[in-house]
Structure formats: C-alpha cells, structure tokens
Image (cartoon, rainbow, N blue to C red):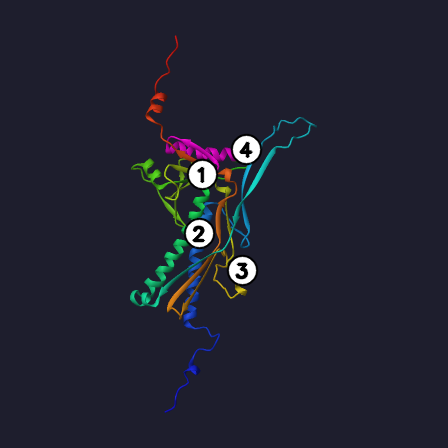
C-alpha cells in the first residue's frame, strides 16, 4: 500500500487561504467600525482632522492671560501692544497602549463563532472607546476656572459664561460651548420633562440645552459638578499604529486608511488552541487651554442662607 506524503497536500507558503481572508475581513471590520463610531463625536466637537504625533511625543497643556490695550489710538500715535502671556506645562507623552483578548477553542465550540468571537470583538471595541472618553473626562476635571453655584441651572449658566469670558480675554472667539454634566443631575433638574438624547462614540448628548450648544450626560462627571469648555478648545492627538517601524519588526496591524487611530490584528494560536486579538491605540482627546475649562461645583444654599436672602434688611433708626 502506497503511503501518502501529506506534506505535498499542505498549502504552500505565502498562499492566501480562506482562514486568512476571514481574519483580514474581521480586522478591517473592527477598525472601520471604531473609526465610524468616533467620527460623529469629532464632528460635534468641531475636530475636522485629528493631529498625528510620533509615539512618545510630549503633549502640553496651556494657561494664558492677557490684557487688551485700548484701541482708541489717535492719528500718528503708536499703537500699544496687548499683553498676552501663555505658559505651557508638560502633560506627559502620548504613547501607544497595547491591548489583547483571547477566545478559547472550547468557548467557540460551546457558543458558536458569532457569539464567542464576533460578540467579544464588539465588547472589546466598546471598552477601547470607553478608555478614550474616560481619559477625556478625567482631563476636563483638571480645569482651572473653578467656582460654586447653588443650583444646577446656575452652574450651567456660569460655566458657559466663564469660558466665554476667558476666551474674550484672550482675544479668541468661542465657537460654541460644550457642557459636561452628571446624568443624574440632568434628570433631577428635568423632573418629568422629556428631552431628545443622542449618542456618539458612547457619549450621550443633547443639543441646544440651557444655553449650551451641546451638553454631554455622563456618570464620569462627578455628581454635583458641571464642566464646560469652548468647542474650539478641544483637540485630538493620535499615534498611527501602522507606523512603518512597527511593521519592520513584524508587528503589522490593520488600520483605517483615512483615519489610522487604532490598529487591530487577529490570529489563531495553536499553542493554546484559541483565537487571539491584539489592538494598538494611542489617542488623546483634550483641551488646548486648561484655563479655558470651567469646573463648577453645585453647593445648595443652607436654610439659614436662604432665609437671609429672602428677609428684608432691617432699617436703622
């Protein structure tokens, strides 16, 4: 009986197989879905094009102050320079973060491919998006325009007023204001009133609300806090995961051709009999001027303070 040399029937090296096509399609779907989900948020925030940075580049936050000199200058007189000072402080480097997940052969067998792999990809993508927005909310909390108000409505109003006033002092126009508030605070203020909530990149928002061009509702904003900044103060930096230096090292990740903000690669591990996925991401959503961020604390007035405000002043004889 003739013995078959099974090696003769194995796929030749470099030949594209069905498995590799499926993996590539899965990678493309992952990065395309991620990019499509973040684009509406970038549109709302007026970010026409995120700024690409090399891995490890130091980012800076800026504080600025200035005095506008009088423009009433007579004919032939020297025009005085307005004093505008800006101070930059290192925020830290923007760096690629590495993430991975794995689905075992047993999980795929028990639950089927769509549940065990595809659904896990969706959850993986959601967690990565939450990382981006969570870091952004943390950054907003570092705003230096701090004050206290007694009601939610006044907190929103003053937060908007403070950032507009700050940008006027800097000689800049605020092209709309984004306000960020705790979800429970918003609904407590609304009571039974209904509002139309929309969502972008997992961030819930409502447009044209209480004077804000857009208000974001999130549990990431501490209850009793209202934060705001001009829309044109918000910027996004990213590191391209498809950097040629990574590819030279054999670390090739699939990225979106138009906006390469996340890289994704998937492969099967025969050592562990599992499907492994790897993601590279270096995204920083932040504000250019940290003193262009208002953080207002809601501190309800005490009963004594309320009575003092409502009682008429005693007349002196």
Residue at left 43%, top 61%?
278
Q: Quadrant of the C terminus?
A: top left
Cα–Cα span, label 2 and label 3: 21 Å
Q: Real-space Cα distance between discs 2 and 1?
A: 20 Å
Distance of label 4 from label 2 (alpha carbons): 32 Å
- Nearer to the camera, 219 or 56: 56
Image disc number at residue 243 = 3
Question: How many labels were placed on the picture?
Answer: 4
The percent position of residue 212, horizontal first and vertical second, equals 43, 37
The first of marks 4 and 3 along the sequence is: 4
Residue where numbered disc 2 is placed? 38
Figure quadrant of residue 248: bottom right
The quadrant the N terminus occupies is bottom left
Mark 2 or mark 1: which comes first in sequence? 2
| Mark-to-mark CA distance, 4 and 3 | 41 Å
Q: Is residue 117 found inside the magenta-colored segment of the image?
A: no
In space, the residues marked 1 and 4 are separated at their CA atoms by 17 Å
Report the mark closest to the observer, 4 or 3.
3
Residues rendered magenta in the picture:
141-166
* Disc number lying in front (2 or 3): 3
Element class at badge 4: helix
Residue for badge 4: 169
Question: Which residue is most to the front?
Answer: 271
Measure how far apart labels 1 and 3 are at the Cα level. Answer: 35 Å
First along the sequence among labels 1 and 4 = 4
Q: Earlier in the sequence, mark 2 or mark 3?
A: 2
Q: Which residue is mark 1?
A: 228
Location of residue 286 with respect to 65 vertically, above or below? below
Q: Is residue 258 above or below residue 9?
A: above
Q: Earlier in the sequence, mark 4 or mark 2?
A: 2
Residue 171 visible in the shown view: no
Check disc 2 and report its element: helix, strand or loop: helix
């Amino acid at each position: 009986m003739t013995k078959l040399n099974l090696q003769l029937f194995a796929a030749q090296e470099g030949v594209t197989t069905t498995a590799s096509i499926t993996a590539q399609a899965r990678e493309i779907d992952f990065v395309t879905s991620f990019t499509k989900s973040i684009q509406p948020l970038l549109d709302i925030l007026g970010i026409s094009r995120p700024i690409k940075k090399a891995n490890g580049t130091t980012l800076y936050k800026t504080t600025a102050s200035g005095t506008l000199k009088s423009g009433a200058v007579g004919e032939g007189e020297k025009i005085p320079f307005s004093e505008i000072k800006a101070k930059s402080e290192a925020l830290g480097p923007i760096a690629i973060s590495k993430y991975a997940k794995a689905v075992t052969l047993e999980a795929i067998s028990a639950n089927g491919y769509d549940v065990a792999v595809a659904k896990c990809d969706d959850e993986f993508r959601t967690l990565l998006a939450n990382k981006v927005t969570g870091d952004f909310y943390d950054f907003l909390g570092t705003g230096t325009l701090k004050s206290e108000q007694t009601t939610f409505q006044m907190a929103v109003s003053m937060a908007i007023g403070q950032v507009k006033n700050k940008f006027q002092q800097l000689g800049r126009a605020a092209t709309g204001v984004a306000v960020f508030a705790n979800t429970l605070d918003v609904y407590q203020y609304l009571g039974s009133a209904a509002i139309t909530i929309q969502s972008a990149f997992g961030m819930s928002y409502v447009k044209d609300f209480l004077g804000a061009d857009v208000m974001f509702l999130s549990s990431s904003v501490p209850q009793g806090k209202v934060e705001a900044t001009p829309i044109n103060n918000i910027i996004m930096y990213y590191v391209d995961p498809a950097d040629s230096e990574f590819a030279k090292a054999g670390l090739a990740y699939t990225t979106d051709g138009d906006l390469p903000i996340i890289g994704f690669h998937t492969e099967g591990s025969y050592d562990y009999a599992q499907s492994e996925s790897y993601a590279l991401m270096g995204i920083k959503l932040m504000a250019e001027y940290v003193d262009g961020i208002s953080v207002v604390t809601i501190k309800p007035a005490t009963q004594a303070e309320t009575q003092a405000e409502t009682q008429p002043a005693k007349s002196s004889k």
